[in-house]
Image: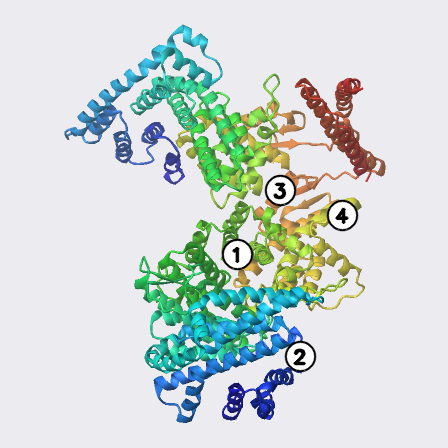
């Protein structure tokens, strides 16, 4: 009864009430007269519920919904209550509000209990035990809360309990006799109910007995006790309720209908009134979680203002924990009562452990930052503004590191150091210094202050991670370290590190993020080799990633367009989540230019040196060869526009021995400007083009000359005579060029012999036969070895018949022959 | 020249006692001030039980100062310990030297131990006394005695750690006494045991274990230098060992300076590269040592280079004969000053010259004699003599002619006729096929037997 009134009153006074709620209360208003008649009670409340939710009356679904509604109401009540609290403490709120809330503080709970009781009554009439069970649960919960605020058990509850017991008994006996059994879920609910009632009866044994003896007295006593106890409770209330609220919010977390904005507001207010560190920690933990909860979907990112406040609050939380070492936040703690205020002095070792995890907050914060960068337009100002937040995020990470260093928790420390490393490993020194400058007041063990250079800082961080037991962190640290060395143009160190880590063998089984990091490191290593002028190494390093033709996808810098198969929605989503934010990208065009140019320098002289068709098929760099073939097929070539055009035309020029043209074309590529040391790279390229041009020239035109003057070569290719001699000598020594030097005349003398067709064939045949023999020797050698094994096994008294093994051997033999024929 | 001296780099990987000959050598070379080296020697000796030697050095260093008191005490202490340990060890030795016992001992160590315990009451602890005494003898410089005791200990003991330690000790004693044959044997067994241990431990899962094997290999490499550069056929053995993948990796990652010795050995054993008739066949590793090494030297250039490795690089990577000649000039002095290499200075120079002229002749058709002599750091007449000798003893004999009038060598290399190259390629085929056939028929026999037994 009073419930309706309350709700009506609510909808009048509280303009923030939701529309649905308004509707309900209107309905209730209309039904109010009927409610006066006790007989109509059960039917009415059902009717009301139905009006609110518009579903069939007896279904379970409806019950659930109504429960949710109820909870929503709870949420609202809590809000109001907290307002009440604040009004009390600050005394600034209007009278009217206070009045309203005073009424609801205790009575509302009673009202609710009664409402639940009524629903139960109704359900009892139609023998719907499922509904009863649900309602009973709620009732018990309410009563427990009542007790938490140290109020006596209301007689209403005891009454319901006693009556329920009796009706249960009758129901059970009826059930036994009845021919038509109840449906399964109902029957199950009935038995469950029996247990529950038994349990609560035991719990409230004293009260129940009192009640049964004299119901009237019990009620009277209660009426007296309630106001009396309310008075002393008043002082404690503020504190206790604060925790109560927090627990409520905690409980409501994750439920569908929770109003997240509201929750956050409540918690913010609570934070203001929180006094002890314990309260502050508790509220902060809840508040930060609530902030992260704001976005339920995985794809969208957190709003920036929420992110910044979450970041601030994490800072606060860390500050609180650092300031007072008697509090410690841990992921696993012993169970403790959520509602009771605790203090460190009560604990055995003087350290109060609170359940929570700062590291996961920090990680989440970092992830959200990345996510928001992923979703922003990288060319807009918004992106740049967002990037500025990285500094504060970096500070938070460092603070967390300082905290864990202090508490010496190695596992989260490793994780937080990894996060820190991930923010700086790919940054050039200047940016890194700027980031570090902001953290100078944070006392971490590993900082730029204690290390002399940024590289040393990275080294120290990595070494820390190497020593941690976590293999994943170790792998990622190695890769970041390699990346950093490559960025610093320290090719040999980076390469040695990569080789010694043996990651190439195991990376296929790693998780996707680590594989991406591996690809990034490899690519950066290739670029580093290119910058250092190690063309061959650069080509070989970049080769793998370019043959796949999915560079962007492998570097997580763009989603690959699948031509033949379409990705499912989930795959696409996962792919999108993996993308790196724009500022971490490695420029793929630059990468391609580096790869193609180094391929050109390796491949063109090789192409010139081989004469038979067969050898021609063995390309070192397939992607380059493909492009070159394509360019050759073109009838008309215009002036180069793209980087590829430049390189293709340069390759052609190089093939024709026009090294100057080749050099100009290559140096004309604009993308080089993106490299920090573009001038020296261009110079290096020019030099390499001269050398390779000379080699190509010699290969291509040697058949047409009997002798060639070294000084002429030196003039043509603007190389010093000494390096020309050196290059030619090298070619002669490696038997690439059938020639010799005439020192006296200063010329190269070519002794090329042209083979006739028959001679060539004879040579090929001889080669093939010897390969054949090699294969056969291998196969028979295996057979002989096997036979010997067999013998020795038999000697040891073990007879093994392995017909299968013989068969396998034959197959292998055939394979060997087949491969020869090809 | 002092910047190319490796003594300081190597000593950390050597036993204290090895450092004495190295330092003594430094005194001779005059690379460093004599006083400094002597001071270093004294500091070293102070830590050992070689009291007299230390006093001697002290007197040399400070001729007018009193010998410090501590030496007297130390000597007394050393003598008493020596007696004490000797008594312990003697008990064991008495038993072992008994001919009955010597006959009764078998391969199985556990059985031996049991036997000794049952019949003579010898326990493992007593046997360990042998080790202790051996070690003590080593500390005061009685290396041959130490070698003896450690040998006996190793035969009897079952303790693996101490055994390894005894192994190292024995090797050190043998090296210091200059018994190169024994030392070589020791070295090989030690190497086997290290390799076996490394092989048994999976690389990826036990970083500490692989680190340990890396350490022991590094040490082994350094110690073995003594043996390899003193033993008769040491250079080829050195190539064989150091070019094995495991040791090459060790050198590349832990001690790239060893490349100097590797290169020197490769140059020195140039003659071994040509098939020596009647001699033991050299492994392909040794035969292609130079080719291999050129690659490695090039690869490790960023870590380590000295005139000797640079010589190889200039010659075979850059083909810059002038630079190679310059490096050779410096390398000559470095080799002369090096502790291990100084005895091979002439030989090294000779071989290096040969390598230069070989490469030179292969690339050139007409060579000015004066020019070549210059490349070889020889005077004109010497050069001519050298070249004539070269032509006489090398394969090019038929193709190279000296034209004294023009003062040039003409090298005429007619291209190989095509039929000859076909013959070359197919020469081995028939023999191999026959061998294969024989092997198959041998293999077929047991399988027929087997078929019967199954039936």
Residue sitting farthest toward the right? A758
Residue A669 visible, this orientation: no
Label 4 packing within 10 angstroms: few (<14), some (14-19), many (20+): some
Name the mark nearer the viewer: 2 or 4: 2
Vertically, is A587 above or below A215?
A: above
Q: Give how far apart the Cα atoms at labels 3 and 1 are.
A: 35 Å
Name the mark nearer the viewer: 1 or 2: 2
- First in residue order: circle 1 vs circle 2: 2
Vertically, is A435 above or below B100?
A: below
Q: Give how far apart the Cα atoms at labels 3 and 4 are.
A: 23 Å
| Mark 3 in CB contact with mark 4 (< 8 angstroms) | no
Check disc 4 and report the residue beneath it: A616
Tag 4 subunit: A
Q: Quadrant of residue A378?
A: bottom right
Check disc 2 and report the residue beneath it: A57
| Mark 3 in CB contact with mark 1 (< 8 angstroms) | no
Check disc 3 and report the residue beneath it: A730
- First in residue order: circle 3 vs circle 4: 4
Tag 2 subunit: A
Residue that appears at 70% across and 25% down: A785
Q: Give how far apart the Cα atoms at labels 1 and 2 are.
A: 65 Å
- First in residue order: circle 2 vs circle 4: 2
Q: Secondary structure at mark 4?
A: helix
Residue that appears at 48% across and 17% down: B108
């Amino acid at each position: 009864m009073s419930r309706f009134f309350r709700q009506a009153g609510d909808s009048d006074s509280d303009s923030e009430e939701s529309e649905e709620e308004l509707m309900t209360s209107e309905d209730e208003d209309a039904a109010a007269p009927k409610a006066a008649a006790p007989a109509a009670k059960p039917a009415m409340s059902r009717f009301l519920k139905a009006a609110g939710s518009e579903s069939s009356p007896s279904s379970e679904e409806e019950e659930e919904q109504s429960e949710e509604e109820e909870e929503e109401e709870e949420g609202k009540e809590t809000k109001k209550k907290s307002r009440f609290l604040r009004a009390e403490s600050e005394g600034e709120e209007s009278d009217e509000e206070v009045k309203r809330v005073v009424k609801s503080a205790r009575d509302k709970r009673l009202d609710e209990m009664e409402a639940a009781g009524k629903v139960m009554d109704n359900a009892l009439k139609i023998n719907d035990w499922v509904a009863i069970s649900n309602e009973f649960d709620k009732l018990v919960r309410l009563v427990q809360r009542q007790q938490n605020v140290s109020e006596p058990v209301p007689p209403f509850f005891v009454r319901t309990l006693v009556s329920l017991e009796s009706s249960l008994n009758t129901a059970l006996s009826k059930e036994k006799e009845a021919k038509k059994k109840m449906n399964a879920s109902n029957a199950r609910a009935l038995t469950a109910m029996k247990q529950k009632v038994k349990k609560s009866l035991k719990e409230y044994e004293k009260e129940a007995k009192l009640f049964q003896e004299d119901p009237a007295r019990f009620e009277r006593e209660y009426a007296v006790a309630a106001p009396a106890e309310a008075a002393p409770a008043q002082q404690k209330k503020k504190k206790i309720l604060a925790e109560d609220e927090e627990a409520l919010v905690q409980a409501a977390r994750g439920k569908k209908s929770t109003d997240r904005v509201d929750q956050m507001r409540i918690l913010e207010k609570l934070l203001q009134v929180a006094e002890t560190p314990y309260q502050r920690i508790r509220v902060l933990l809840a508040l930060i979680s609530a902030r992260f909860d704001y976005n339920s979907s995985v794809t969208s990112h957190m709003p920036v203002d929420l992110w910044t406040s979450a970041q601030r609050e994490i800072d606060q939380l860390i500050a609180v924990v650092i300031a007072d070492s008697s509090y410690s936040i841990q992921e696993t703690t012993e169970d403790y009562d959520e509602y009771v205020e605790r203090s460190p002095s009560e604990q055995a070792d003087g350290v109060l452990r609170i359940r929570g995890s700062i590291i996961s907050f920090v990680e989440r914060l970092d992830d959200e930052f990345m996510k928001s960068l992923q979703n922003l337009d990288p060319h807009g100002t918004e992106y740049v503004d967002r990037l500025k937040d990285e500094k504060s995020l970096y500070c938070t990470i460092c603070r967390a590191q300082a905290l864990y260093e202090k508490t010496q928790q190695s596992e989260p420390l490793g994780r937080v150091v990894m996060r820190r490393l991930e923010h700086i490993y790919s940054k050039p020194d200047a940016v890194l210094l700027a980031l570090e400058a902001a953290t100078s007041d944070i006392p971490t063990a590993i900082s730029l202050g204690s290390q002399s250079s940024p590289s040393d800082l990275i080294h120290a961080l990595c070494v820390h991670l190497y020593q941690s037991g976590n293999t994943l962190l170790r792998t990622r640290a190695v890769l970041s370290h390699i990346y950093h060395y490559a960025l610093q143009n320290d090719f040999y160190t980076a390469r040695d590190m990569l080789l010694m880590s043996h990651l190439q063998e195991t990376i296929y089984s790693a998780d996707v993020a680590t594989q991406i990091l591996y690809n990034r490191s490899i690519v950066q290593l290739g670029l580093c080799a290119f910058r250092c002028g190690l063309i061959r190494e650069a080509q070989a390093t970049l080769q793998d990633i370019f043959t796949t033709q999915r560079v962007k996808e492998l570097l997580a810098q763009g989603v690959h367009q699948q031509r033949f198969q379409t990705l499912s929605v989930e795959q696409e989503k996962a792919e999108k989540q993996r993308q790196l934010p724009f500022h971490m990208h490695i420029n793929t065009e630059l990468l391609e230019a580096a790869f193609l140019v180094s391929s050109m320098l390796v491949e063109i002289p090789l192409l010139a040196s081989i004469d038979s068709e067969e050898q021609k098929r063995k390309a070192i760099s397939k992607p380059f060869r493909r492009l070159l073939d394509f360019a050759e097929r073109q009838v008309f070539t215009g002036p180069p526009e793209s980087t590829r055009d430049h390189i293709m035309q340069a390759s052609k020029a190089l093939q024709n021995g026009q090294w100057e043209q080749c050099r100009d074309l290559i140096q004309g590529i604009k993308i080089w400007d993106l490299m920090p040391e573009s001038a020296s790279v261009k110079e290096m390229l020019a030099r390499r083009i001269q050398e390779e041009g000379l080699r190509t020239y010699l290969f291509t035109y040697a058949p047409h000359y009997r002798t060639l003057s070294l000084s002429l070569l030196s003039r043509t290719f603007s190389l010093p005579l000494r390096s020309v001699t050196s290059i030619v000598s090298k070619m002669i020594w490696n038997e690439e060029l059938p020639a010799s030097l005439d020192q006296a005349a200063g010329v190269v003398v070519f002794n090329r012999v042209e083979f006739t067709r028959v001679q060539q064939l004879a040579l090929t045949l001889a080669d093939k036969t010897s390969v054949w023999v090699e294969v056969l020797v291998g196969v028979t050698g295996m057979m002989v070895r096997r036979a010997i094994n067999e013998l020795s096994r038999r000697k040891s008294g073990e007879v093994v018949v392995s017909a299968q093994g013989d068969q396998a051997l034959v197959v292998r033999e055939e394979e060997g022959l087949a491969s020869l024929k090809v | 020249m002092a910047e190319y001296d490796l003594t300081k780099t190597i000593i950390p990987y050597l036993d204290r006692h090895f450092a004495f000959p190295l330092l003594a050598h430094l005194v001779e070379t005059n690379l460093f001030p004599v006083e400094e080296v002597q001071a270093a020697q004294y500091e070293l000796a102070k830590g050992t039980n070689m009291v007299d030697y230390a006093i001697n050095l002290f007197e040399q260093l400070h001729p007018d100062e009193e010998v410090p008191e501590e030496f007297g005490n130390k000597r007394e202490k050393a003598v008493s310990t020596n007696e004490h340990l000797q008594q312990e060890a003697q008990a064991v030795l008495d038993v072992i030297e008994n001919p009955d016992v010597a006959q009764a001992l078998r391969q199985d160590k556990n059985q031996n131990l049991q036997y000794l315990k049952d019949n003579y009451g010898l326990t493992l602890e007593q046997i360990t006394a042998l080790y202790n005494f051996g070690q003590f003898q080593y500390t005061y410089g009685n290396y041959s005695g130490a070698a003896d005791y450690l040998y006996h200990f190793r035969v009897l003991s079952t303790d693996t750690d101490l055994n390894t330690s005894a192994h190292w000790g024995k090797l050190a004693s043998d090296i210091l006494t200059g018994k190169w044959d024994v030392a070589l044997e020791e070295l090989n067994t030690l190497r086997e045991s290290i390799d076996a241990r490394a092989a048994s431990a999976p690389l990826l899962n036990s970083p500490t274990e692989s680190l340990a094997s890396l350490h022991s290999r590094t040490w082994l490499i350094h110690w073995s230098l003594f043996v390899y550069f003193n033993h008769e056929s040491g250079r080829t053995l050195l190539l064989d060992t150091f070019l094995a993948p495991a040791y090459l990796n060790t050198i590349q990652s832990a001690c790239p300076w060893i490349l100097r010795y590797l290169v020197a050995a490769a140059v020195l054993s140039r003659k071994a590269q040509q098939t020596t008739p009647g001699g033991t066949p050299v492994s392909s590793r040794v035969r292609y040592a130079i080719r291999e090494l050129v690659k490695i030297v090039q690869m490790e250039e960023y870590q380590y280079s000295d005139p000797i490795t640079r010589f190889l690089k200039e010659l075979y990577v850059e083909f810059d004969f002038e630079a190679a000649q310059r490096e050779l000039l410096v390398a000559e002095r470095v080799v002369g000053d090096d502790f291990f290499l100084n005895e091979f200075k002439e030989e090294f120079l000779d071989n290096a010259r040969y390598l230069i002229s070989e490469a030179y002749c292969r690339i050139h058709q007409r060579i000015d004699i004066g020019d070549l002599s210059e490349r070889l750091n020889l005077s004109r007449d010497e050069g001519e003599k050298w070249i004539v000798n070269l032509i006489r003893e090398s394969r090019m004999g038929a193709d190279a002619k000296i034209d004294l009038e023009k003062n040039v060598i003409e090298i005429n290399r007619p291209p190989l006729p095509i039929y000859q190259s076909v013959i070359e390629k197919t020469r081995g085929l028939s023999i191999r096929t026959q061998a294969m056939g024989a092997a198959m028929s041998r293999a077929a026999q047991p399988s027929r037997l087997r078929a019967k037994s199954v039936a």
